[in-house]
Amino acid sequence: MKEKLTRNIGLKILSIILAAILWLVITNVDDPITPESFKNVPVKILNADVINSLDMVYEVVEGATIDFTVAARRSIADNLSVSDFEVTADFAKLSDVNAVTIDIKCPRYGDDVRVTDGLYQVMKINREDLVNKDFKVTVVSKGEPAEGYFVGEKTASTIITVSGPKSKIERIKKIVAEVNVTGASQSYSSYEKLKALDDEGKEITSNLTYSQSYASININVYQTKEIEMKVKTIGSPQQDYVVAGVDYEPKTIIVAGANDILNSTSELLIEEDVSGASENIQKEIVNLQEQLGEGLLLAGSDNSAVINITIEKAKTKEITIWPGDIDTKNLPANMDLTFITTGPMSLKVVGPAEELKSLNRNSIKPYIDLKDYVSGTYAVKVQIDAGTYATLADSPNISVYLTSKGQQ
């Protein structure tokens, strides 16, 4: 029996070896080992509380995703997907330089899948103190309201607390909520997502936590109206000087407000003091909104105004008038008027040279004001309504007699 087993032993061993080789050849031909690559695979972080417990936060600066290649038989490789792998970074093993080795496992196939490229990769992080800061919400609008309407106050009633790395919090210029006002014709409320912006208006998106991600916004929408802008001079220039002209732009502005306020508003009057002036005055009103009354908003594109006031040497002109040239204002209805003065009167008119050229006894429109006068004899000051800038150097008196109607 022993002889039978040992007979041709070499041949038998060779047969076994050849059979194994043949099996390997057949196997590798039918189901060869092939590579399979995976790109941008997210790395799962384990034990992040290790950092959070220190009142710190982290930011991944390298290794948030990785690429790697594995080798497996074709029957396995063809069925592999990212979900078959556990790609993790355990912060419990974080080094002093804030780096940790990334672990790649394939629980489904175990040792039948072998990482051939990308096995030794690390995740690197920055960590900082956790900081909290409160912000008011700034509301910005996009789009245009309906024609004839203006978007006024946009308010958010809540204060937002933002948490994050100190360096990120220090970069925040403002927290904004953006509302779309396209076609709006009445006031309304909306619920808008918040975002953080830096000094350049760029959004800061990572590693920030908000006490609430959305805020309730109130948007006031008003009707608009075009009104005149007028400039009036007050005070008197230096002696022997007069105001010769006032020019300004714009002549009209667009305002917005509640309907009752708009209905009672027809103009914006700006007063400019020329007291003591002896030369031209040029002035820019940078912010017209400050000139508007309460409840009105500047709605047009003209936010500023330019005013030019011409000051020049005063000229005089003597104009002779007669009592018949004089008009009466505010003569009581129950009174009769008789002029006692019957002869001519000389009026000395002061003003800009160009304006004085066209003045005469008719165009200066002389008048007397008899408001609150009763029966009697009076010396009443003569006044004129000559033009824009011409005035009397002094006001001469004219004698008049007032009697009640029906009396002799």
Image: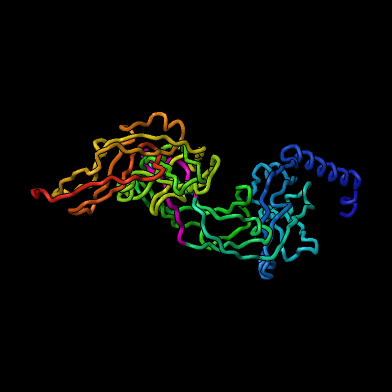
* Residue 119 relative to residue 235: left or right: right
Residue 46 on the magenta span: no
Number of marks drawn: 0
Q: Is residue 368 visible?
A: yes
- How is the model colour-coded? rainbow
Q: Residue furthest front?
A: 343
Determine which quarter of the picture holds residue 382. Answer: top left
Location of the N terminus (image quadrant)? bottom right
Of the pair 365 and 92, the residue shown nearer to us: 365
Horizontal and vertical percent for residue 14? 88, 43
| Dominant secondary-structure state across the stretch colored magenta | strand
* Residue 247 relative to residue 165: left or right: left
* Location of residue 50 with respect to 348 vertically, above or below: below
Residue 148 on the magenta span: yes
Q: Residue furthest top?
A: 358
* Residue 21 relative to residue 56: left or right: right
* Residue 403 relative to residue 13: left or right: left
Q: Residue furthest left?
A: 406
Q: Residue furthest bottom?
A: 53
Of the pair 32 and 85, the residue shown nearer to us: 85
Horizontal and vertical percent for residue 366? 30, 39
Q: Which residue does the image show at 54% across and 41% down from the upper left?
A: 281
Determine which quarter of the picture holds residue 168. Answer: bottom right
Q: Which residue does the image show at 66% across and 59% down from the upper left?
A: 170
Q: Which residues are magenta?
A: 140-157
Horizontal and vertical percent for residue 320? 34, 34
Of the pair 62 and 232, the residue shown nearer to us: 232
Horizontal and vertical percent for residue 215? 47, 57
Q: Is residue 248 visible?
A: no
